[in-house]
Amino acid sequence: LKNAAKEGTRRADGPKFRKIGCVEVLEAMKNHPHYQTPLMGPNRGRGVAIGFWFNVGLQSSCSIAVNADGTVNLIEGSTDIGGTRTSIAMQAAEVLGLPVSDVHPSVEDTDTVGYTAVTGGSRTTFATGMAAHDAAQGVVAKMKERAAKLWEVDAAAVTAAGGVYSSNGHSISFRELAGKLGETGGPVVASATVNARGAGGSFAGVIVDVEVDPETGKTTILRFTSVQDAGRAIHPAYVEGQMQGGSVQGIGWALNEEYWMSPDGVMKNSSLLDYRMPTALDLPMIDTVIVEVPNPAHPFGVRGVGEANIVPPTPAIANAIYRAVGVRLRRLPMNPPAVMRAIWDKKS
Amino acid sequence: MAKVYIPALLRELTGGVEVVDVDGGSVRAVIGSLEQAFPGIGERLMDGDRLRPNISVAVDGEISPLGLLEPVGPGSEVHFITAIKGG
């Protein structure tokens, strides 16, 4: 904590950190029962580490159309690979003051919606969510105009809160107003595009307990806790899924995954049968702790959560192996042959 | 004046100077000022009328999506850093 990066600390690549949650992640790790509980037994060790990923924004588009029954259709260009269809719909619903079940999201291509950069890493809930927020604000502005027409007042005099539009004693719900679009000017559609700025950057930490078999060099993960600053967790269960997936990827790099190259540069283990990724059979339940230090550059405080959590498993596991059997491994993967070699080297 | 941090690989062109104060306006203007002071540095940063694809520019802590068109204020910090693809 003494040396933890804070807002204004210079990053390794030069620029200064903006508002970040490094200290908060470390505090959450320190206070977690996993960290507080002693680890007993021979050849067992605990390791901790934190990591950072800066995240990016990139381009995203979103379009929202209001239906006569008060639901809306949301069209986005981000392929859903981790639950983003919901997390983006939730951001639009929040602005519109509607239950998320009234937002019908669909993922389309550029025949239907503006260009949207790749769904990858950690950008989608951040950047496409920002486009959905802006498009929803466009819908709210148009709905205010329609309410103003009904009541023959200036649109600036209409307020919207919780899906209810009001002005000078008049009041109408979004659903009722949606049923009157024909008589107030026709369909309401709003679109927004962003080249999203203000990616927050995210810190993630790991606490891991391992047991190393000194006869075979095999490392077994006994307990694993992933902690991450998500900014604002729009859909906490999906955030946890990202944290667990990233953790497993990091564990795979730490313990198993390895390229075998021939002398002339051909990858010899070129299928997933020969590239050992961890499965549910290899791992305990991965516990998660979501820390929320909102990103001030996003309307809902979102940071990317898909990548930072891949960083700390490797150093945390290396630290745990050191505490378990006293050997410091500095190359990956730390698989059984590598661990045995280190143990033999130490003995000799 | 904007403060420009020269990456290690380009310091051979600045005589080892790491930080340079130049007139701002935009990243394009910053590179123009650098080129006047350190001939040859512009070619290392730009490919025609764009930043080289292996280079990103961060202004005041944020990697810019606008490249040469990014505004640079009088007190801004500008970093030319290795481009890393990611999401």
Image (spheres, coloured by chain):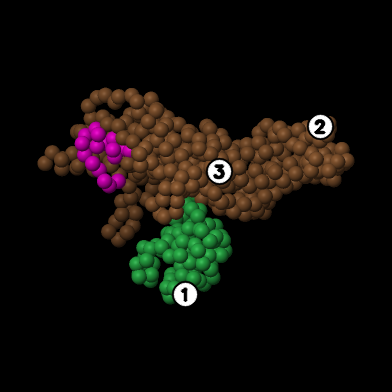
Chain colours: A brown, B green
Q: Is residue A42 above or below residue A142?
A: above
Q: Is residue A223 above or below residue B20?
A: above
Tell me which residue sits at (79%, 39%) in the image: A158
Distance from Cα at disc 3 to Cα at disc 1: 38 Å
Q: How far across and down, in percent of the image, does residue A316 sit?
A: 33, 38
Q: Between tags 2 and 3, which lies in front?
A: 3
Q: How far across and down, in percent of the image, does residue A194 sit?
A: 62, 52
Q: Are marks 2 and 3 on the same chain?
A: yes
**Picture quadrant where residue B41 is located:** bottom left
Quarter placement of the N terminus of chain A: top left
Tell me which residue sits at (62%, 54%) in the image: A115
Distance from Cα at disc 1 to Cα at disc 2: 64 Å
Disc 1 residue type?
A: Gln
Residue placed under numbered mark 1 in the picture: B36
Q: Are marks 2 and 3 in contact (CB under 8 Å)?
A: no
Residue placed under numbered mark 3 in the picture: A296
The chain holding disc 1 is B
| Helix, strand or loop under label 2 | strand
Q: Are marks 1 and 2 in contact (CB under 8 Å)?
A: no
Q: Are marks 3 and 1 in contact (CB under 8 Å)?
A: no
Q: Which segment is the magenta one?
A: A316-332
Tell me which residue sits at (24%, 37%) in the image: A322
Q: Between tags 1 and 2, which lies in front?
A: 1
Disc 3 residue type?
A: Pro
Q: Are marks 3 and 1 on the same chain?
A: no
Horizontally, residue A300 falls left or right of residue B20, namely right
- Do we see residue A32 in this rendering? yes
| Helix, strand or loop under label 3 | loop
